[in-house]
Image: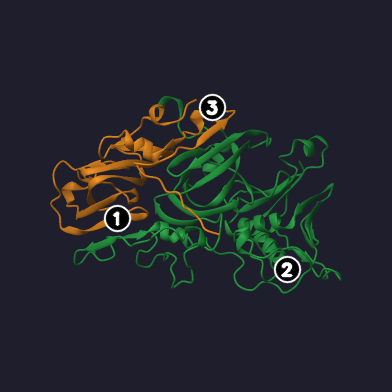
Chain colours: A orange, B green
């Protein structure tokens, strides 16, 4: 018996369906590839929200700003190839928000910590105490496990199935 | 009704059945008996029969999950509810017919006592060659008389990472070396490693691994492993094939993110079990499972699923008291 695994991408995705005798808003059903096909580069669109915690779908295209958070975040690459570059934060660059990602005003001034090049299925640590930048030569998608923060974008009515 | 608090209870076993060889068990007011095809659960005013494969698949997962979040329905009648320190075992409590005829029953036990009882029953009833954690096409049959008790760990696959899988000192991802080859259902995928280049002095601080490779090597189904945790936000991943052998009733909101293939979910009202609908999730789909439903998944082909959980202690009580809405995106956010 042979198998064909179905993965999806920006170029090819098929959304499922929801038929419930309930308020569809309670289920917030969306598709991350559809979300990212309409997103601006590196717009961090919440697709899951669990009180203070969030999963953000990010369209990786070109070079991002520098981000940091007061806690670990994790990125799962779902499409394409994304390079993550890390710098150690200096005292003056540490995030002032309690949770979620914020952007640095300028390029980080601390030591370069290294880089990761990740493709579909790879999970990347975005460690607390670091600034990170994403770069993708072709459009890709990352799903970020994080908390809601200053960079989080909510547009549930536009991304979710409502009828 | 009949919620009875019992502080310390030990499971007791009968002599082996002279024909089939299995023992019968008594735990609190419940009795458990199996024959060649079925498990018969008894309680003071009732009895219920469950097909043995379904019962054992549910029971070993209930043990392995530590009774999980909220309600684990083995079927529409029998199951457990986790109170994080104590566990209810119920029969008919969430079934209108049982309640109306007053044959429903619920008893509360210390968690450790339930774990011991369920492990004792499972060990006696699982024969060599049958592994209830594997997909049905990957294991033998649980039917028939007792042969040899299965060897090896009864439960596995739920090793939680403390920060992120693969970091120094944390849980290692599955690999050939750990005895986990790529499952047949994902043999068509290619798995490579991320490029990880830490600067000198930052080794172990820059990290990545192939999450899909880890999932593709699972030798268990419907049995998640924690891969990354930030504060109380938990990412669980799991490979799903055939059907979720329990119906899960949430005590909090959770989210499903379909990584590959598809899963069909039946949705029911949590308290009544009445059908609410159906959700088909395909690769890239994201869907909340509200705190007022039960859900059961069906995966026609082995797939990869990510479950996004909030493990904050005490959330179950806040949802139960109505302090939190039973759905994640409140009205003002739309």
**Badge 3 local density, few (<14 within 10 Å), some, or many (20+)?**
few
- Is B273 left or right of B43, judged from the image as shown? left
Residue B217 location, x and y as percent?
A: 47, 63
Q: Is residue B291 visible?
A: no
Q: Nearer the viewer, residue B217 or B104?
A: B217
Q: Which mark is residue B124?
A: 2
Q: Return the chain for callout 3.
A: A
Determine which residue is flagged by label 1: A118
Residue B220, by quadrant, is bottom right
Q: Secondary structure at mark 3?
A: loop
Direction right: furthest residue: B18
Q: Quadrant of the N terminus of chain B?
A: top right
The residue positioned 40% from the left and 45% from the top of the image is A8
Select label 3 or label 1 by which is in front.
1
Sooner in the amino-acid sequence: mark 3 or mark 1: 3
Question: Is label 3 in contact with label 1 (beta carbons under 8 Å)?
Answer: no
Q: CA distance from mark 2 to mark 3?
A: 46 Å
Q: Residue at x 57, y 41 (%)?
A: B265
Q: Is residue B40 visible?
A: yes
Give B23 or A14, whichever is nearer the viewer.
Answer: A14
Give the x, y percent position of residue A91: 18, 51
In percent of the image, x 38 and y 27: which residue is there?
A158
Measured in 3D between alpha carbons, the distance from the residue under mark 3 to the one under mark 1, in whole angstroms, is 38 Å
- Does the CB distance between marks 2 and 3 fall below 8 Å? no
Residue A42 or A72: which is nearer the viewer?
A42
* Residue under numbered circle 3: A23
Q: Residues within 10 Å of mark 1 (few under 14, many from 20)?
A: many
The image quadrant of residue A50 is top left
Q: Residue furthest front?
A: A1
Quadrant position of residue B270: top right
Q: Residues within 10 Å of mark 2 (few under 14, many from 20)?
A: some
């Amino acid at each position: 018996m042979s198998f064909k695994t179905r993965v999806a991408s920006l170029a090819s995705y098929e959304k499922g369906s929801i038929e419930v005798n309930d308020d569809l808003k309670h289920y917030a059903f969306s598709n991350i590839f559809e979300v990212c096909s309409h997103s601006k580069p590196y717009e961090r669109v919440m697709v899951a929200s669990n009180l203070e915690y969030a999963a953000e779908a990010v369209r990786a295209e070109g070079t991002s700003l520098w981000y940091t958070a007061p806690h670990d975040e994790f990125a799962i690459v779902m499409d394409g190839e994304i390079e993550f570059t890390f710098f150690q934060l200096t005292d003056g660059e540490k995030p002032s928000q309690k949770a979620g990602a914020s952007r640095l005003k300028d390029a980080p001034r601390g030591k370069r910590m290294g880089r990761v090049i990740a493709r579909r299925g790879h999970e990347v640590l975005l460690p607390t105490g670091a600034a990170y930048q994403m770069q993708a030569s072709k459009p890709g998608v990352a799903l970020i496990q994080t908390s809601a923060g200053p960079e989080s974008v909510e547009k549930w009515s536009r991304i979710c199935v409502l009828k | 009704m009949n919620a009875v608090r019992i502080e310390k209870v030990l499971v007791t076993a009968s002599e082996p059945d002279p024909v089939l060889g299995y023992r019968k068990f008594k735990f609190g007011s419940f009795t458990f008996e199996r024959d060649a095809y079925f498990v018969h659960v008894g309680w003071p005013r009732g009895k219920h029969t469950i097909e043995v494969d379904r019962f054992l698949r549910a029971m070993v997962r209930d043990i392995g999950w530590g009774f999980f979040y909220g309600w684990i329905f083995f079927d529409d009648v029998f199951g457990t509810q986790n109170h994080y320190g104590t566990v209810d075992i119920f029969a008919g409590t969430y079934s209108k017919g049982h309640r109306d005829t007053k044959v429903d029953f619920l008893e509360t036990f210390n968690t450790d006592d339930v774990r011991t009882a369920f492990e004792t029953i499972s060990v006696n009833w699982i024969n060599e060659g049958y592994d209830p954690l594997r997909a049905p096409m990957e294991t033998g049959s649980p039917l028939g008389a007792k042969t040899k008790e299965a060897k090896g760990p009864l439960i596995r696959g739920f090793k939680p990472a403390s920060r992120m899988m693969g970091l120094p000192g944390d849980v290692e991802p599955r690999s050939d070396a750990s005895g986990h080859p790529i499952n047949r259902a994902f043999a068509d995928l290619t798995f490579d490693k991320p490029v990880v280049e830490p600067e000198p002095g930052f080794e172990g601080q820059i990290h990545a691994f192939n999450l899909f490779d880890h999932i593709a090597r699972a030798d268990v189904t419907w049995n998640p492993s924690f891969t990354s945790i930030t504060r109380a936000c938990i990412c669980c991943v799991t490979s799903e094939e055939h059907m979720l052998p329990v119906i899960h009733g949430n005590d909090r909101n959770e989210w499903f993110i379909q990584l590959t293939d598809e899963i069909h979910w039946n949705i029911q009202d949590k308290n009544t079990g009445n059908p609410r609908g159906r959700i088909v999730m395909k690769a890239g789909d994201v869907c909340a499972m509200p705190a007022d439903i039960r859900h059961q998944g069906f995966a026609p082909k082995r797939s990869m699923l990510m479950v996004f959980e909030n493990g904050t202690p005490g959330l179950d009580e806040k949802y139960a008291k109505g302090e939190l809405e039973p759905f994640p995106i409140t009205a003002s956010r739309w």
